[in-house]
Amino acid sequence: MEWLIMEQWSPYAVGIGIGVLSWITFLLSDKPIGCSTAFTRTSGMIEKLFRGNSVTEKAYYKKFTPVIDWEWMLVFGILIGAFISAKSSGQFQLTWIPSKWSEAFGNTPILRLVTAFVGGIAMGIGARWAGGCTSGHGISGTLQLAVSSWLASICFFIGGIITAGLLFRFF
Amino acid sequence: MLATIHNQKRSQLVIGLGVGIIFGFLLQKGGVTRYDVIIGQLLLTDFTVVKIMLSAVVTGMIGVHLLRDLKLAQLHPKPGSLGSSLVGGLIFGIGFGLLGYCPGTLAGAIGQGSLDALLGGLIGILIGAGLFSEFYPILDKTILNKTQFGEITLPQWLKINPWLLILPLSIGIIALLYLIERAGL
């Protein structure tokens, strides 16, 4: 069972594993794997704490009720699964700055945090604007051959490649 | 039998959690819960993300379409339009390049201790999702439905049997992965 605590697996083994996992969700849950609605629901739950039940009257929260659902549990599960894998292979470590970032932009945590925060806002808006993320469109949608997902996924990478390229070249 | 399981709310939450744990475990083992690997993909120096995604797509595509032919599963293609898929996709891409995680791998990054994912990315995504919900009514009226194409799949659009696309596409993806490996990427 030593392979379970190996630091890294072949990307193809991981990809095939995720593909098989998608069969399971279609079979057992009648749902494709996705992640981004969990963030909308969480955002709604937090807003509800501050602004009360009127929040659930918002048009978007009528589509995605701010409650814990299947996809929310899935995203929470990702956190646990990654923790188990990292901890059992000795890779769990609290870090402020990824090494590729510090090589290019130095060791100031605040700069990394602000960039991640701004990127997070764009991602939160973009994922719901496009109706999915790298999981829901990028894997689950493309494997169903959905036109929307192929278009959105290509745009994820076009936008990401241009942004990362500009960031690392000019700053 | 399957429909009964689909309707059991509690069991579904447990299945969701279980699938998530395996998914997160796999993402971490693949290295894609790390900023360095994702940004390496966007800088086109490390093709781990593409290798994982494309092998998942080939495996998933063949299996899910077989399940559908056996009447064990139904497809759920998402609706789309140029206004939502294209514009939203590009906005997501900007976030992808700045954040260096996507929503799923961000959860995994938090699980392996990345504080930039927890204190920068997570808070940002939650605020972004909240902002979208706030402005949804006006976006829905103006841009989201521009040039709609609905819940259509490529085989429906091309009016062909899905397998006529699945087989060449799978071969094409495997050939592409072979070339990526040969180029040493």
Image: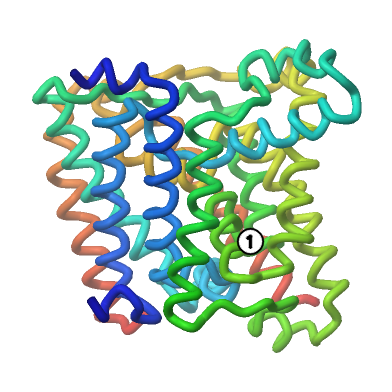
Q: Name which residue type carries label 1.
A: Ile
Q: Is residue B58 left or right of residue A170?
A: left
**Residue shown at 23% from the left, 50% from the top:** B58
Q: Which residue is more in the foreground, A11 or A86?
A: A86
Question: Among all residues in the image, which is located at the extreme left?
Answer: B70
**Residue shown at 28% from the left, 31% from the top:** A28
Image coordinates of residue B122 in percent, x first then y, are 72, 52
Quadrant where the C terminus of chain A is found in the figure: bottom right
Coloring scheme used: rainbow
Q: Is residue B8 left or right of residue A54?
A: left
Q: Secondary structure at mark 1?
A: helix
How packed is label 1: few (under 14 Cα within 10 Å), some, or many (20 or more)? Answer: some
User: Residue A103 occupies which quadrant of the picture?
Assistant: bottom right
Q: Which residue is more in the foreground, A158 or B104?
A: B104
**Residue shown at 46% from the left, 59% from the top:** A81
Q: Is any part of residue A137 visible from this angle?
A: no
Quadrant where the N terminus of chain A is found in the figure: bottom left
**Residue shown at 17% from the left, 40% from the top:** B63
Image coordinates of residue A136 in percent, x first then y, are 46, 39
Total numbered labels placed on residues in the image: 1
Q: Which residue is more in the foreground, A73 or B104?
A: A73
Q: Is residue B13 left or right of residue B102?
A: left
User: Residue B90 occupies which quadrant of the picture?
Assistant: top right
Name the residue tied to disc 1: A162
Image coordinates of residue B19 in percent, x first then y, are 38, 45
User: Residue B119 occupies which quadrant of the picture?
Assistant: bottom right
Q: Is any part of residue B95 visible from this angle?
A: yes
Image coordinates of residue A91 in percent, x first then y, are 51, 81
Q: Is residue A75 above or below residue B151?
A: below
Which chain is indicated by disc 1?
Answer: A
Q: Is residue A88 above or below residue A162?
A: below
Q: Is residue A145 above or below residue B113?
A: above
